[in-house]
Image: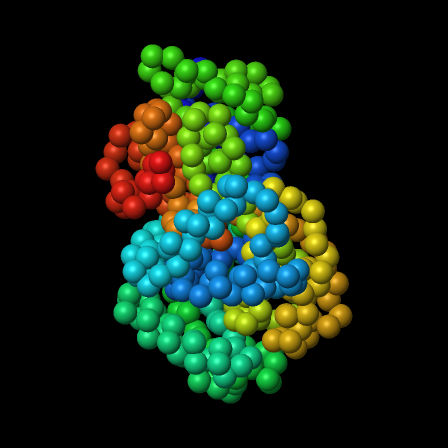
Amino acid sequence: MTDILIIGGGIIGVTAAYFLAEAGAGVTLVEKGDIAAGSSYGNAGLICPCHSEPIPRPGVLTQGLKWLLDAESPFYIKPRLDPELVRWLWRFQAHCNETAVQRAIPLLRDMQRESLRLYQALIAQEQIDCDFERKGGLTLFRTEAGLAKGHHEVEAMGRFGLQMELLPDAAAVRALEPSIHPDIVGGIHYQEDAHINPARFVHAMAAAARAKGATLLTDTEVLGFDTGERGLTAVRTSQGKHIAQQIVLAAGAWSTPIARQLGLAIPMQPAKGYSLTLPRPANFLHTHLHLAEAKVAVTPMGSLLRLAGTLELAGFDLTINQRRVNAIRRAAGSYLIGLENQEPVEIWRGLRPCPPDGLPYIGRSARHPNLIIATGHAMLGISMGPITGQLVAQLACDQPTTLGLTPFSPDRFA
């Protein structure tokens, strides 16, 4: 028997286990694969308060429909007859408006700023080597139309107190990053942002959680649940039954089918993303980049360089579409000089859990009061992971939470 059983071994589940063990709770975490084997592994590793716009915003769905037949586009919806996808798209389009965006930005900003604070504290406290660097970030534009949008973004996001500076021409950009292609017309300097090697951080936090007394079980798949008078009483897994007083569901994109076993609807779509990890040329890049028109991120991670991008709604299909991988590589070559002879050491894909309104689900379930749900962070799982883990621990220990959780209610679409 354990006080708290956590389902999911990504950054949210692992940091929750760490904070709960630190508070003295008995914690067991179960993960169907390995620690950080899902979308916490091969993502861009960005901690980016300056990128606090939700995915649903004006024009996104219209552009996505234009890209529908282009399998190499940054945002791709695989055509299929899927009632859940149709319902999700209906809710998604309802949030593609300025009112919803203006409501979401300060929520995502505060989550990411709190996570950045926790990253710095945890890395120092646990002496974690994860290539953490807080040097800000750059968005690069290849077109004047893109730069004009960048000018609007700096003005709009500046109203939320985010530290951003427009770089009006190629000279201003290349003064910060000489490896940038001369065709770049300008950029944005995001002064608050940071980056890490995500897998190294999550594995280090898993070791720290174990050192504090948490039990982390891998290759342990959830098969079902037992219920009693006090709610959920046990989790049945491929490695036996675990009796627990409280349960935390933090299984990323797989949270929706698991929740369905409990009669809960948590609307999400698994959004496939890709990354290529290359050897990093000497003196190449001082900070991470966003390649604006291509929707690709480029992150230096010690001796490695990661190119990450695309959002593909294709269900739980984990096959690798080589055309999309090639599109990411070509995009990097059109913005940067010096990658021509770098061959990938790893090609990865993973599924990000995307809610239709762009906000994560964090809170207790109304139907099962001893169930805490923490999922739906879309492309900001690393950026909001530590604060989510801390919020879960505060909820489980009946403590005041660092941030208000009403907007993140897991029952908001019930």
Quick check: can you spot residue 11? no
Residue under the point 44% across and 66% down: 59
Tally the numbered discs. 0
Instruction: Answer with the quarter of the image where residue 75 lies.
Output: bottom right
| Relative depth, front residue between 183 and 191 | 183
Percent x, y of residue 274: 62, 55
Percent x, y of residue 348: 66, 51
Residue under the point 67% across and 65% down: 327
Residue 71 placement, left or right of 96: right
> With respect to residue 232, does 55 lie above or below?
below
| Relative depth, front residue between 23 and 357 | 357
Q: Quadrant of the C terminus?
A: top left
Instruction: Answer with the quarter of the image where residue 266 lies.
Output: top left
**Residue that lies at the very extreme toward the top in this rendered image:** 229
Instruction: Answer with the quarter of the image where residue 98 lies.
Output: bottom left
Residue 322 placement, left or right of 128: right
Q: Quadrant of the N terminus?
A: top left
Residue under the point 43% across and 80% down: 148
Quick check: can you spot residue 58? yes
> With respect to residue 413, does 263 lie above or below?
above
Residue under the point 54% across and 61% down: 65
Colouring mode (rainbow / by chain / secondary structure / one colour): rainbow
Residue 99 placement, left or right of 112: left
> With respect to residue 6, does 79 lie above or below?
below
Percent x, y of residue 79: 61, 51
> With respect to residue 169, does 234 lie above or below?
above
Percent x, y of residue 123: 45, 49
Residue 161 placement, left or right of 278: left
